[in-house]
Structures are given as C-alpha cells and as structure tokens.
Image: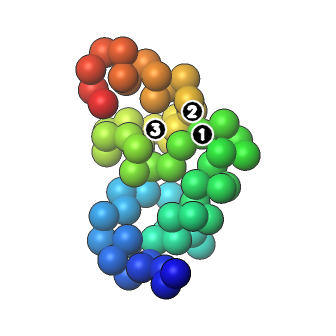
Amino acid sequence: MECRQTQNKLKCNCTYEPCSRKGICCDCIKYHLRSRELPACFFPCDVERTYDRSFEKFAELVQIGRI
C-alpha cells in the first residue's frame, strides 16, 4: 500500500514542529499509542495546542460532547 503523506499533511492539525511523522499516519499512531496518547487529528485544534493528547483527555471531550 502506498503512503499518501502529501494528502495526509493537508488535514494534519499537529502543531508540534518539527514532527518527522507528519502525514505518515501509521507511524504517528504507533508513536502516540506507546505513550497512551492519540494523535493530534483526534482532537479539536484548541485542545491539540495544549499537547494533552491523553486517552483521558479524549474521554473527557467525548463525555462533554466536544467529540
């Protein structure tokens, strides 16, 4: 399967610079799961900028209806 890195980057809301995984979703997911986190694209932009990408933060946002 061919990676669509260029297309993926267009929708990537990650504000961490420089991230070597931008647009390479499989590497990004693997990296974040090791830390019990989800990638930036799972979060609204205002929350993503806090860099709290934890499972707990995601669950909190689901409970309050933001996701």
Question: Residue 59, relative to residue 27: is it above or below?
Answer: above
* Distance Cα–Cα, label 1 vs label 2: 4 Å
Q: Residues within 10 Å of mark 3 (few under 14, many from 20)?
A: few
Residue drawn where x is 59% and y is 72% of the image: 20
Looking at the image, tell me whether mark 1 or mark 2 is earlier in sequence order. 1
Q: Are the residues tagged 3 and 2 within 8 Å (C-beta)?
A: no
Q: Residue furthest front?
A: 1
Q: Count how many numbered circles sit on residues in the image.
A: 3
**Circle 2 — which element?**
loop
Q: Nearer the viewer, residue 53 or 3?
A: 3
* Distance Cα–Cα, label 1 vs label 3: 13 Å
The answer, for residue 26, to whether it is visible in the render is yes
Q: Nearer the viewer, residue 2 or 36?
A: 2
Q: Are the residues tagged 1 and 2 within 8 Å (C-beta)?
A: yes
With 26 as the anchor, is 31 left or right in this view? right
Q: Residue furthest top?
A: 63
**Circle 3 — which element?**
loop
Q: Which residue is mark 2?
A: 54
**Circle 1 — which element?**
loop
With 22 as the anchor, is 42 left or right in this view? left
Q: Which residue is mark 3?
A: 50
With 34 as the anchor, is 17 left or right in this view? left
